[in-house]
Image (spheres, grey):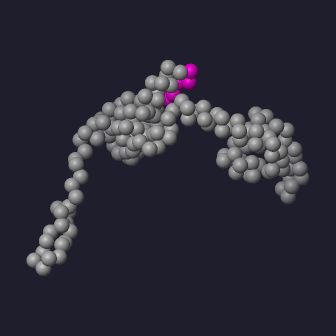
Amino acid sequence: MNKTEVAAELECSTRQVEKYAAENRLGRVEYVRGKRGREARYTEAAVASLRAELDRERQEVIGHAPAQALERQTGAEGMAILVSAIKDALQGSQAPKMLLALTDAAEVSGLSASHLLNAIHDGRLDGRKIGRGFKIRPADLQEYAKQVWKDAPEYEKPKAKKLGNGLKVKASKA
């Protein structure tokens, strides 16, 4: 298998395949003459072995943080799951991230990144600019998500108006 085929099989980039080869995780690499010079060839057994190893690593990571639960739950419920996962991981051997990037916080909370950024600038959410991006503590994000949920108005469906001829017309937003 060539580098591109291995990348497709492992669902990663060709650069990552090169890193796996440099780490000797793909076994012995054979070089053959190709159209543009030497091409690396990998055995299917080595690729299958690395695929199984990567799947085991992914399962270990999922075991430490309930990713499937977070995909189904957003808002306050998702934040509660995230905070409990962080507490569980802190008690375990692998410590989680203590700070969330703005995009990660947006994904977990169900709020947009621009909304969270505006909240940081307005002082409603505690966040710090570290490097190029903003970082937020999970506990601060959970408190903010609860506050947003509490302050959110109830949605009322507009009522239809009846005309004299028996037809109904949707009410305009006023």
Q: State the count of labels.
A: 0
Q: Position of residue 80 (x, y in %)?
A: 38, 33
Q: Position of residue 140 (x, y in %)?
A: 36, 31
Q: Position of residue 165 (x, y in %)?
A: 12, 79
Work out whether residue 57 can be spotted: yes
| 82 sits to left or right of 124 | right
Q: In the image, which residues are magenta?
A: 93-98
| 27 sits to left or right of 67 | right
Residue 50 is inside the magenta segment: no
Place residue 47 in its image quadrant: top right
Q: Residue at x 22, y 58 (%)?
A: 157
Work out whether residue 107 can be spotted: no
| 88 sits to left or right of 124 | right
Foreground: 126 or 23?
23
Q: Residue at x 89, y 50 (%)?
A: 32
Q: Residue at x 50, y 25 (%)?
A: 89
Q: Position of residue 85 (x, y in %)?
A: 46, 29
Q: Residue at x 81, y 50 (%)?
A: 1
